[in-house]
Image (tube, rainbow, N blue to C red):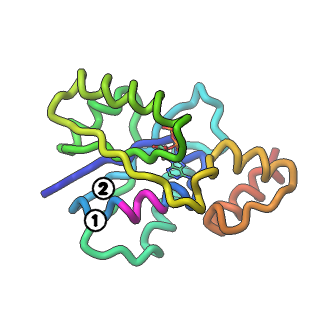
Amino acid sequence: MRRAIFPGSFDPLTNGHLDIIRRSCPLFDEIVIAVLNNPDKNPLFTVEERCSMLEEILPTLGIEGCRLVVDSFSGLTAEFARERGATAIVRGIRAVSDYEYELRMALMNRKLEPSIETVFLMAGEEYSYVSSTLMKQVFELGGRVEGLIPPLVEARMREKLAEN
Ligand code: ADP
């Protein structure tokens, strides 16, 4: 049983995240999409809202042969991975700018849990400029983010914007 975790804020989920999930599926039997509970970062969506969007969207991807599980966590990623019996942490790399931070995190996680490897997957070119932060900024200013985030996420963002 090859189990990995794919940790992140997913605030909100973008097509870039889904691209990484699709790419990692042939490599593992199970992937736990691990939503970081980060209230101090003042997220747009609560961790429950982020998890529920993932739970609605993942089955629509039509992925076979890899079980996708949604969970949330707080604290150390490496510890969560160990608790879940994962042997790998999946992360996406978009550009050189991601590399330095990801390298530090991967080395720290290896120090904490030497048996767990971080596996980096390169973003699809079409999503290499997509980040949750940029999506929020553009959306809040009325720009079009069609094709870059799932339609369900776009609808929930519109609702959030109307609430605030
Ligand atoms: P974090 O706050 O942990 O970086 P994110 O939700 O921003 O959480 O990202 C989670 C993971 O998804 C990270 O490994 C990030 O590099 C990757 N990721 C985010 N956007 C993209 C994208 N457009 N293409 C590929 N990977 C991405």
The magenta stretch spans which residues?
Answer: 19-23
Residue name at image x 65 percent, y 31 percent: 42
Q: Does 87 lie within the magenta span?
A: no
Examine the structure image and report whether residue 20 is included in the region drawn in magenta: yes
What is the number of callouts on the image?
2
Q: Which residue is mark 1?
A: 67
**Residue at position x 33%, y 59% from top?**
24
Residue 50 is situated, as x and y percent measured from the top left of the image, at: 54, 51
User: Is residue 70 toward the left or the right of residue 127 in the image?
Assistant: left
Residue type at mark 1 is Arg
- Residue 158 in the image: state x and y as whole percent: 77, 58
Q: Residue at x 54, y 43 (%)?
A: 95
Would you place residue 148 above or below residue 39 in this image? below
Q: CA distance from mark 2 to mark 1?
A: 6 Å
Tag 2: amino acid: Ile
SS of the residue under disc 2: strand
Question: Residue reaching furthest right?
Answer: 142
Return the residue at label 2. Answer: 31
Q: 69 or 99: which is nearer to us?
A: 99
- Residue 150 is situated, as x and y percent measured from the top left of the image, at 61, 66
For the residue pair 126 and 19, the one nearer the viewer reads as 126
- Seen in the picture, residue 154 relative to 97 is either above or below; the reply is below
Label 1 Cα crowd, 10 Å radius (few <14 / some 14-19 / many 20+):
few
Give residue 137's mark.
none
Q: Secondary structure at mark 1?
A: strand
* Image: 120 above or below 53: above
